[in-house]
Image (cartoon, rainbow, N blue to C red):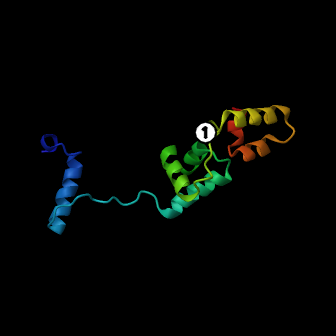
Amino acid sequence: MVRERGYPTVRQLRRWVRAWQTSGEKVESVKRKPRYSDEQKLAAVEHYLNHGRCLAFTRRTLGYPSDVVLNRWLDERHPAKRRLISGIHKEVKRQAVREFCTRLVPARDIAQKMGVSRRVLYK
């Protein structure tokens, strides 16, 4: 039946049948329970913002699945906080490199001004 009708999986077909049996009507979609609570999402976003704005570090430390999920949570809660150096205009990047090489201010201050982690600035 799954191959013939093109349903996603046998498991999903079973879910649809179970939902149809309980409601007695055709079920368009069955909503999944959220995998992470709002508290877990908030903790991940706060960790990202307070520990160098590094997605990989946050993911490894807290055990979350992917950078894509963390990016989505960040964009939901703090859309302006996630600023990547690759998305910045070339002249701004050059200015950051100039400031970094002359070292009139600490690298941490330059990174904060650019909205990136210190590690990204060193790269």
Taking the image as shown, residue 61 lies to the left or right of residue 23, namely: right
Q: Closer to the camera, 12 or 112?
A: 112
Which quadrant is the N terminus positioned in? top left
Taking the image as shown, residue 26 lies to the left or right of residue 72, namely: left
Work out which residue is located at the far bottom of the displayed protein and give it. 23
- Image: 49 above or below 67: below
- Amino acid type of the residue tagged 1 in the rendering: Gly
Q: Position of residue 73 (x, y in %)?
A: 52, 54
- Residue that badge 1 annotates: 87
Going 15% across and 65% down the picture, which residue do you hit? Answer: 25
Work out which residue is located at the far right of the displayed protein and give it. 104
Residue neighbourhood size for the residue with mark 1, other residues' Cα within 10 Å, grouped as few (<14), some (14–19), many (≥20):
few
Q: Position of residue 66 (x, y in %)?
A: 49, 44
Q: Secondary structure at mark 1?
A: helix
Q: Closer to the camera, 33 or 123?
A: 123
Q: Position of residue 106 (x, y in %)?
A: 83, 42
Which quadrant is the C terminus positioned in? top right
Going 73% across and 43% down the picture, which residue do you hit? Answer: 111
Q: Position of residue 50 (x, y in %)?
A: 67, 54
- Image: 71 above or below 88: below
Which image quadrant is residue 56 in?
top right
Report whether residue 66 is seen: no
Going 76% across and 33% down the picture, which residue do you hit? Answer: 97
Taking the image as shown, residue 34 lies to the left or right of residue 93, namely: left
Report whether residue 33 is seen: yes
Which image quadrant is residue 55 in?
top right
- Image: 31 above or below 98: below
The number of numbered discs placed on residues in the rendered structure image is 1
Going 31% across and 60% down the picture, which residue do you hit? Answer: 31
